[in-house]
Image (spheres, coloured by chain):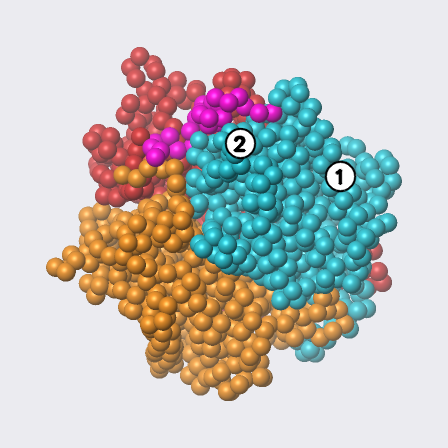
Chain colours: A orange, B cyan, C red
């Protein structure tokens, strides 16, 4: 989502692809055609990012234990729905205030999103390069992604409604404010030269920080960590679902990164989107392969869950800069991300931080790595311009999230009682089962 | 699918988005470029609507009991396939007769669909704004959706082949004839000024009426309603599948409503499609949230199945008019739809109408609500112009469906025998199991 | 993926769709706009083909026994990832050498794929009609499909790492070399006039031949064929997953066949893509229905697995020529494909060739049929021009694959030991279970 200088009409006319149409008079892509291209691109990439909500849902439903599956489905359906309303009512204008900052570069505008009038012919659209509706639709999906990241880490023990309250705060306020600092043209963009193309930091690390704060305050699941330091694995109950979720996320990521080019009104822009698709794909492959080989080497057997998370970490890693790397560099950036997962999952366990699906390694650790990796392939990036924003965003999100989680803990409580946790949240909190007819071993 | 007046080239030229390309000469979107845009839009939105067939399949497979799952998969695969052939051979020209009405405005043309010749360069296409193939592809998916709605309501007891016979009649004749009245330019369009943008009535209520007729004639599942008025819940056997199906449908609905704009050849049209995407999404969110809150209030625990159906009811509710509402209005229209589901599901149970997946509340009741809700945001709608077509379509579909169901019942029979129903349709009718290795509790 | 003559600008200008924009000056689709259209089309159809990787994964995970499910998930995740790297490092330039053939028309170029520079404004792109990145992305997905076909046939008994070694050879060398013969402009294209639009032979039969060689050398699963000639059915453990996989593949096939038009820069091309979408859909429907009716007639009960494979066989059958058939012809071509499956599955069992998911009937037999069926609707096809390439590709792929499989068998071994096979590959090879909490019957 970098702001890119529009290629002038003159440049376009000079494009030698002209050879194609033989003698045809070369006409630049005009403003309206470019508007249609870019808007439609936002809609297509936006529905791909929407689809990631289903991916997170399947991934998490597959990785929790059977007795908490229906609750995980409920949380994901509900978080997306509440995020959609919260971002519409508050988040969008906080994130993209235009000229209406409440505090310039720091705090955006208040008020619900308003789309352009129906059939805007003859009226000037609010955005010159795409419709506001397509931009809102696309950006909403990024905001919802942040909340999806949190739900996996805190699964199997958090209460439904307090979790959803946090989701509302996250998607109405926390995510949009920090996103405005970079993508809304705020101080991280103008003063730091921070580069984060599609959100390794702005989306993924934010979800990760919020999840980390929650995991620390919520505490681990009963029985996960014994006093003598043993870690009890709680294997995912349905690995085909988890694998399906990973494929869905992989697919959705083409939209996540590709749409963040923000323009498809020229050959140069669509070629860049193509590079992004190819790089995104190869980074995921690199992450999966490195997690597979490393888990084979370390544990003698490759670990499917590590491979799934490795692919996702590869995707997170390439998200801060999916455009400038070559295919080889993108593969390696993704492979490092996959490796991070293999080492970070047991590392968190040693710290007794219980992250049910590995969301913190995948989204926070690989997100930080990806943001730093911009330095390797994009000469516009500076060390300070990457590191300081990582820290600023991290401190902001972690502290605000921790305050909210603590406030919830001290008032309504955020954790189900022991008996409910042991019996499973499905029966105790929802009174239903995800697989009522299948008997358990 | 409203017939929209094409924006004239003059208007386009005047569009102030011109500022974008600086000094570039402004060229209107020419006819061929518009043709490509609109045709490709039909293909993309059409494949999204195709994907809804998978959504219904997963939703229904997740909501039936384990012993009827393979049959539900079979019915969905088969109904889509038969619908595709029936619509090709008969339905398409019945629905879109052009100037060849058999009875003007009431009964379309007979004969199979014929697509345009390969590589139509130098030949005039049958449609001036998009290719016939893309239109056929897109419209076929709507027709198949109607049949998918029926299969869920009648699950767990209907015989396979009689069900498929009904599907053929529905998709070859019933759906296309009534659809021609509105979308083919028939009497509901020309004489009543009926507004139904993407088919709350024309698609969803039609599926609902056909399902209602079937459910009444078929009768409830064994053991569902006891003589003393108790209702035995038969919980869905695989809620992750049902949730996946809901997400698939939600995704597909962007194509369902968005593609119904029918044109993407101008900035105004693509901006309208964007609004539709955003409104469709927020209506689903509204429906999910209202069903969640209402089920929490009424039953002390939120009900996942209600939330899934609430989201779907929100989608059905916004389908008659996804363009003119603001985001706030769309959210509320969807929320009312979600509320309808929460009240209508027990209401149908009181009437001993056994609808396995809640298809009648979601598609018929919310479809009627959505069609009436057009009055709230579109000043072109009239009370009579909405209510009378709802009734006309309802009576036509219900009566014709009931006649077919009765004829089938009296001849080949439509219901499996008691022993088969008790043992499950998978073993008795198909001789296979959906999950042969998993033991049941 | 036929090389098509570009429609000249003059033809475009003459297109009578001009009537649409009334008095507007008609401008041909210029080179840059065509470049954007075609490139974006590759990205959209490419992500649909990517999605087929998830389809194969779900199909195979649903059709293997419960104890081998996690391994099948692992194999599919890993094969796609390795294919992505192998095709990038070696395959792409072997397949599309341009003017750099190592042996003209037979052996392509060596070296990794290099995408165009970022923001190619002012520079000439390597392809004049679309970006190299989009072409690479699209073609990679076809290569990966070939490997997906193999994994299903050899499931439940092959070792993970030797299988992946074969995948690397297949996707780096075997597939690209034979694909270059047709789609890279090699001798099958120039000397034989071979027509294979989207790869009934080049993709599907290739996967099928490689699977057949593997199945013969690997041998059947323990207990599948008794000495007295009885065949023990091993029913798929999760038919909803298999059905979901089939729907995913069906959806992805619109991209597979539609994108193979290779151009979307004119009304004629987009209309052709539309025909392809419609024909692809109807062929799948035809295949599903014929398999359903035939299995009903032959076994008194329709067989869901046959219906799923029938739909897939219909899709494979139309892949060699999805453009020239009418809807009726496409339906029949698909129906024959569906029939092939019903007869070929027991035929392979009689030969004691153990193909777990039916990949050889679906992809090899229906692939050959589809390639021959080009003769029925495309007058440019010749009997020799279709038959000889089928044989040449078949012999090449089968022999090279057999050599690799034999070499692997004689060195590292390709088959797990008996105990591992009996206990299931999940526990013995991966140390994990796909459904650890569900008890088995």
User: Residues at marks 2 and 1, common chain?
Assistant: yes
Could you tell me which secondary element the residue under label 1 belongs to?
helix
Outermost residue, top direction? C228
What is the magenta range?
B414-441
Query: Which quarter of the figure is the C terminus of chain C placed in?
Result: top left
Could you tell me which secondary element the residue under label 2 belongs to?
loop
**Rendered image: mark on residue B395:** 1
Counting other residues with Cα less than 10 Å from the Cα at mark 1, is it few (<14), some (14-19), or many (20 or more)? some
**Residue C211 as seen in the image, left or right of residue A223:** right
The chain letter under disc 2 is B
**Residue A343 as seen in the image, left or right of residue C305:** left
Please give the name of the residue rendered at 59% of the width and 30% of the height, measured from the top-left corner: B219
**Residue C282 as seen in the image, left or right of residue A185:** right
- Which of the 4 image quadrants contains residue B51? top right
Outermost residue, left direction? A228
Please say if C233 is above or below C199: above
In three-dimensional space, the C-alpha distance between marks 2 and 1, rounded to whole angstroms, equals: 31 Å
Across and down, in percent, residue A342 comes to 26, 58
Across and down, in percent, residue B80 comes to 60, 36
Give the mark, 2 or 1, whose residue is nearer the N terminus: 2
Across and down, in percent, residue A383 comes to 34, 79
**Residue C275 as seen in the image, left or right of residue A195:** right
Please give the name of the residue rendered at 49% of the width and 72% of the height, measured from the top-left corner: A172
Q: Nearer the viewer, residue B91 or A405?
A: A405
Query: Which quarter of the figure is the N terminus of chain C placed in?
Result: top right
- Figure disc tally: 2
Across and down, in percent, residue C317 comes to 55, 32
Label 2 belongs to which residue?
B227
Q: Nearer the viewer, residue B352 or B304?
A: B352
Res. A433 visible in picture: yes
């Amino acid at each position: 989502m970098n702001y890119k200088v529009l290629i002038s009409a003159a440049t376009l006319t000079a494009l030698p692809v002209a050879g194609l149409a033989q003698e045809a008079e070369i006409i630049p892509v005009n403003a309206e055609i470019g508007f249609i291209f870019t808007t439609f691109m936002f809609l297509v990439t936006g529905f791909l990012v929407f689809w990631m909500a289903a991916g997170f849902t399947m991934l998490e439903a597959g990785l929790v234990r059977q007795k908490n599956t229906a609750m995980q489905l409920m949380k994901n359906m509900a978080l997306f729905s509440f995020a959609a309303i919260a971002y519409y009512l508050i988040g969008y204008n906080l994130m993209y205030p235009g000229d209406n900052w409440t505090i310039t570069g720091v705090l955006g505008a208040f008020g619900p999103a308003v789309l352009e009038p129906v059939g805007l012919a003859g009226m000037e659209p609010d955005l010159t390069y795409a419709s506001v509706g397509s931009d809102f639709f696309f950006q909403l999906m990024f905001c919802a992604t942040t909340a999806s990241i949190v739900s996996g880490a805190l699964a199997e023990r958090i209460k439904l409604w307090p979790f959803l309250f946090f989701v509302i705060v996250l998607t109405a306020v926390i995510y949009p404010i920090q996103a405005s600092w970079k993508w809304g043209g705020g101080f991280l963009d103008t003063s730091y030269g921070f580069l984060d193309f599609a959100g390794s930091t702005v989306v993924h690390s934010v979800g990760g920080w919020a999840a980390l704060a929650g995991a620390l305050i919520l505490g681990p699941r009963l029985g996960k960590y014994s006093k003598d330091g043993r870690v009890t694995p709680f294997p995912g109950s349905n690995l085909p679902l988890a694998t399906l979720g990973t494929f869905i996320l992989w697919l959705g990521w083409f939209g996540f990164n590709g749409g963040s080019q923000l323009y498809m009104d020229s050959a140069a822009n669509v070629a860049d989107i193509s590079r992004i698709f190819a790089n995104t794909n190869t980074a995921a492959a690199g992450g999966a392969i490195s997690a597979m080989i490393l888990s084979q080497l370390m544990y003698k057997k490759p670990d499917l869950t590590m491979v799934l998370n490795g692919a996702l970490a590869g995707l997170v890693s390439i998200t801060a800069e999916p455009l400038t790397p070559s295919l080889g560099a993108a593969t390696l950036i993704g492979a490092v991300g996959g490796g991070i997962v293999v080492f970070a999952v047991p590392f968190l366990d040693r710290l007794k931080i219980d992250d049910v699906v590995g969301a913190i390694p995948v989204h926070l650790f690989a997100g930080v790595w990806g943001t730093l990796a911009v330095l390797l392939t994009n000469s516009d990036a500076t060390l300070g311009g990457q590191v300081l924003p990582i820290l600023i965003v991290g401190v902001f999100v972690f502290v605000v999230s921790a305050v909210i989680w603590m406030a919830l803990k001290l008032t309504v409580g955020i954790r189900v009682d022991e008996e409910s946790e042991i019996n499973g949240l499905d029966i105790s909190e929802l009174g239903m089962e995800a697989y009522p007819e299948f008997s358990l071993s």
